[in-house]
Image (cartoon, rainbow, N blue to C red):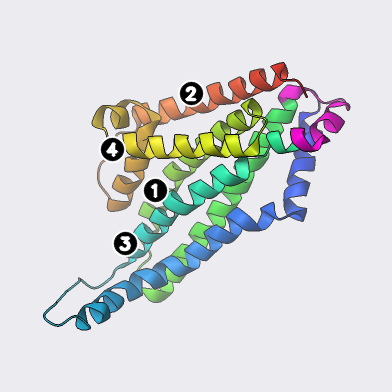
Amino acid sequence: MIGLGAFLGKELTEIRRTWRLWVIPGMLLFFGVTSPIIAALTPALVQSMAASQPGVLIKLPPPTALDASGQFLKNLDQFVLIAVVITGAGVVSGERASGTAVLALTKPLSRGAFVMAKILSQVTLVMAATVLGTAACLGMTAVVFDGAGAARLVTAVALWLLDASLLVVVMTLFSAAFRSRGAAAGAGLGFYFLTLLFSNWGPAARYSFLGLLPATRDALMGEPVSLGWPLTTAVAAIVVGALAAVVIFERQEL
């Protein structure tokens, strides 16, 4: 891993000075602020829509802090993970297409360090943005509702963050494997929707990292969660995926 520290520093500096600083952090901050507001307004909006239809009566229970946390978590699953796919599609293929990968690798920098710096910088960005968004959600929830339910939300978000880190590694692998950013994004979206589909299958959820998605919902609801297999397989998948990305990139022609 020759040059890992220096190249990682360059990647983090690039994140701070380019549009990547605003995409995922901006989304998480936006969802953190708006999720409690949306949760509080939803019953009133539904009732007002129902009132415009003669004979239709809809009664919803009063919104709670748990609804705000659930809305935030839903936004993480649906929007932020897709943003991770789109932004991660070009981390390797984009630099290879523009020629900057060749320029970087003429320095004392190994290909393995190049790939690992990409993974570590992206995971760092997602983690920092998630902490910011979660803090914003808890703060706004405390303002809108009586309580924030911090412990459950933090546990659920921590599980989601592991799932997001795995997706970062998978997207780096696809970006190293495909020369086209579009092909990498397409493969990533396919992976995302397949994991979303099979996470509802009991055996897959119990014995693989696919169980992280339902585990986040269970943790938020305060239900007992069995995390042995999902955590073990998620960590194993992250390690194997990162090594596979390195091996593939080392065999690619620039």
Chain-order first, disc 4 or disc 3: 3
Q: Which residue is mark 3?
A: 66
Density class for disc 2 (Cα within 10 Å; few <14, some 14-19, many ≥20) is some
Q: Position of residue 142 (x, y in %)?
A: 41, 70
Q: Are marks 2 and 4 in contact (CB under 8 Å)?
A: no
The quarter of the rendered structure image containing the C terminus is top right
Residue 68 screen position, x and y as percent: 36, 64
Element type where label 4 sits in the image: loop
* Residue 156: assigned label: 1
Q: Which residues are magenta?
A: 96-112
Callout in the foreground (2, 4): 4
The residue lying at 70 percent from left, 16 percent from top is: 251
The residue to which callout 2 is attached is 236
The mark that comes first in sequence, 1 or 4, is 1
Can you say which quadrant of the picture contains the N terminus? top right
Front disc: 4 or 3: 4
Q: Quadrant of residue 74?
A: bottom left
> Where in the figure is residue 27, as x and y percent of width and height?
55, 59
